[in-house]
Each structure stands twice: as C-alpha cells, then as structure tokens.
Image (spheres, rainbow, N blue to C red):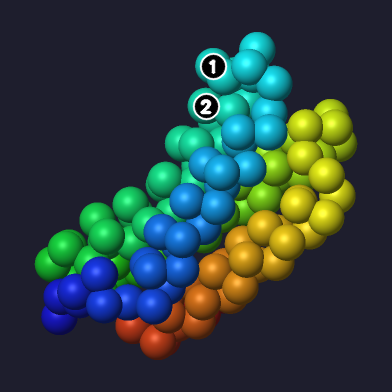
Amino acid sequence: MRHNYKKLLVWQKAMDLVVKTYQLLDKFPKDELFQLNAQIKKAAVSIPSNIAEGSGRKTEKEFSYFLYISHGSACELDTELSLGSRLGYLSEDDYELISKDIEEIKVMILSFEQKINPSSRD
C-alpha cells in the first residue's frame, strides 16, 4: 500500500522543521557555511525526503526502513543543533524550541512506523 506523503502530518511537520532550521542557520557565523551549517541542512532535509522516498516504495517493510533513516536524521539534526548552541551560534532558547519540534517528529515517525509495520517492534 502506497501513501501520499504530502498528506502525512509527519511529512508536513518535517517540512516545517526544515524551514525553521534554515531560518536558525542565518544566526550561524558565515565561516560555518560549508561545515556545520551544511551538515545541519543535510540532516534536516533528509527527514522529510526519506519519508517521501519510503512512501513510494513497494512494501510497508521498505517504507518502514526509510522511516528509520528519517528518525536517525532527526537524531543527527538534534545533535548538530545542540552543538551549534554549545558553540554559541544559537541561543539556548532557540535550541530548546527547535529541539521540542524535533522530538515531536521523532515520536511521530516511530509511531507511524509501528502502525504500518507492527512486526518491527524491537
């Protein structure tokens, strides 16, 4: 069964997260443009991209795999933004707000994955 990813709330929220992430990156120093900044963008974009890619796969098991990748990218994004905060590029408040969004998306991804592939529970 294939899913229309654009109708999935988790994909919509992940897209919003990408926009928020890009907006926060405007606060990073310009010398980070091709280093941490680029890595953060890659992780953020990977979240909705893997949801979309998985939705087009043939089986729910394949979709589940891409949801796990998406979840991993969300963990990576949170780590990289935490580092940005520790380096003083983001305020603690900015980091806490986006970290809450990331956590919500991670929960949604895992919940959705469990719904489409109940046999995958660890």
Res 74 → quadrant: bottom right
Residue in the image at 38% along x and 69% along y: 12
Residue 53 in the image, given as x and y percentages of width and height? 24, 56
Residue 66 in the image, given as x and y percentages of width and height? 35, 58
75 or 13: which is nearer to us?
Answer: 13
Q: Tag 2: residue type? A: Ala
Residue in the image at 13% along x and 67% along y: 58
Rounded to the nearest angstrom, the CA distance separating label 2 from label 1 is 5 Å
Task: Check whether the beta carbons of the residues at disc 2 and disc 1 lie within 8 A of each other.
Answer: yes
Q: In this view, does 93 lie to the left or right of 40?
A: right
Q: Tag 1: residue type? A: Phe
Mark sitting on residue 38: 2
Disc 1 element: loop
Residue of label 1: 34
Q: Is residue 59 left or right of residue 75?
A: left
Residue 12 versus residue 40 in the image, above or below: below
